Image: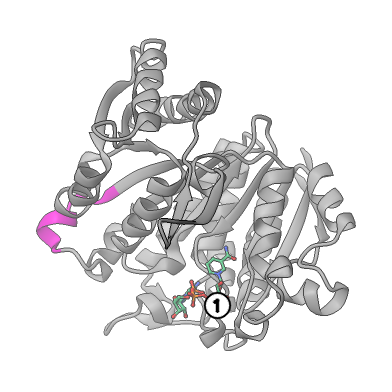
Amino acid sequence: MKKNIAVLKGDGIGPEIVDQALLVLDKVAEKYGHEFSYTSVDIGGCSIDKHGVPITEEGMAICKSSDSVLLGAVGGPKWDNVDPSIRPEKALLAVRKELGLFANLRPTKLFPQLAEASPLKESIVGNGIDLLIVRELTGGVYFGKRRTEVVNGEKVATDEMPYSEHEIERIGRVAFETARKRGKRVASVDKANVLDSSRLWRATMHRISEEYPDVEYSDILVDNTAMQLIKNPGQFDVIVTENMFGDILSDEASMLTGSIGMMPSASLSSGTLGMYEPIHGSAPDIAGMDVANPIGTIMSVAMMLRYSFDMIEEADAIEAAVNCVLDDGYRTADIWRDGFKKIGCAEMGAAVAARL
Ligand code: NAD
């Protein structure tokens, strides 16, 4: 199969970690007879420096016409004080919007080899964690109307949280379809005891759940979910929720695995085009030192193969190779402890490619 991939390395550790993911993709191409071609697009601070904007129109056009987009990370102290209209993160929101990326998939997987890296007790995470948060990405309070006005002599700020049935339905379907390929359980998270948008969310989820009788469905309030993720994370398979709840819960869940450097993500459209990136930022404190953990980015390309290219065997092979490398005792600094072999970013990429 031939696929065109837009490669957006970005800032900080972005180029180092993306290079390792490309090494792994090249190995997949060689092993399975595929052809991956890469087109580089500047994004974030490096694009501001070169072009005066965080992504150019030509860059956006390349993303839109590609089969998939691979992103490193954007931002850093150098661009903290640029005009808000051209901040590095603006490029991410623009790509999500232009590509219609309404579904954000964030798996939280605790590799048994790294159980000690989790801040939770062995008695809680001992059986492993393998959950997937499906977060709605283009609706809700982040995209609702907002205003600040003076009422009775004091400032009052308002943010609206709109959701329409079709927005809820399409993210619900992503959750149910994905659950069918995993543990066949969906927990829908809302605040239906208080919010109208959550009551519509719950009613719509109930309606579509009837179309998936093979998937076990439950509702859970967001405050209880925050608690359950710490108390018994192993109970969850797929969690589906709206934009802001998903933003907060997915960061909470990511910490269960010990290092943010291990975590991949996918943002999907209604077609096969998706954007794949590790969940962490540009880590300016370790940029250029060859110590960053590239596994989150490598697992992101595994998600690209699985969700955009339907290359299931290839995706499984990457995940198995990462497992083997951890079994072999190799660790980057963020997951290293006594008795293991400490290696750098490039060595980790090479080790995964070699294991493939
Ligand atoms: P960060 O995720 O970059 O770093 C947080 C901590 O985790 C740092 O100590 C860092 O060294 C460590 N870390 C992150 N990734 C790692 C990896 N792969 N291996 C080992 N350690 C890793 O978050 P931050 O410091 O709050 O933000 C830095 C910059 O990144 C900011 O400009 C922020 O706006 C930007 N940011 C970008 C994205 C994105 O591009 N999607 C996401 C979050 C933050």
**Quarter of the picture holding the C terminus:** bottom right
Name the element at disc 1: helix
Determine whether, in the image, residue 298 is placed left or right of residue 246: right
Residue for point 10% across, 57% down: 123
Tell me where residue 11 sits by quadrant: bottom right
Which colour scheme appears in the figure? Answer: one colour
Question: Does ligand 1 reach within 8 Å of label 1's beta carbon?
Answer: yes
**Segment colored magenta:** 121-129
Determine whether, in the image, residue 208 is placed left or right of residue 41: left
Q: Is residue 349 above or below residue 267?
A: below
Query: Would you say residue 202 sits in the magenta stretch?
Result: no
Q: Is residue 111 above or below residue 286?
A: above
Badge 1 crowding class, 10 Å Cα cut-off, few under 14, some 14 to 19, many 20 or more, is: many
Residue for point 43% across, 48% down: 244
The residue identified by callout 1 is 345
Q: Position of residue 199 (x, y in %)?
A: 34, 26
Instruction: Judge whether residue 158 can be spotted in this image.
Output: yes
Tell me where residue 19 sits by quadrant: bottom right
Residue for point 25% across, 26% down: 218
Q: Position of residue 120 (x, y in %)?
A: 18, 63
Determine whether, in the image, residue 132 is placed left or right of residue 59: left
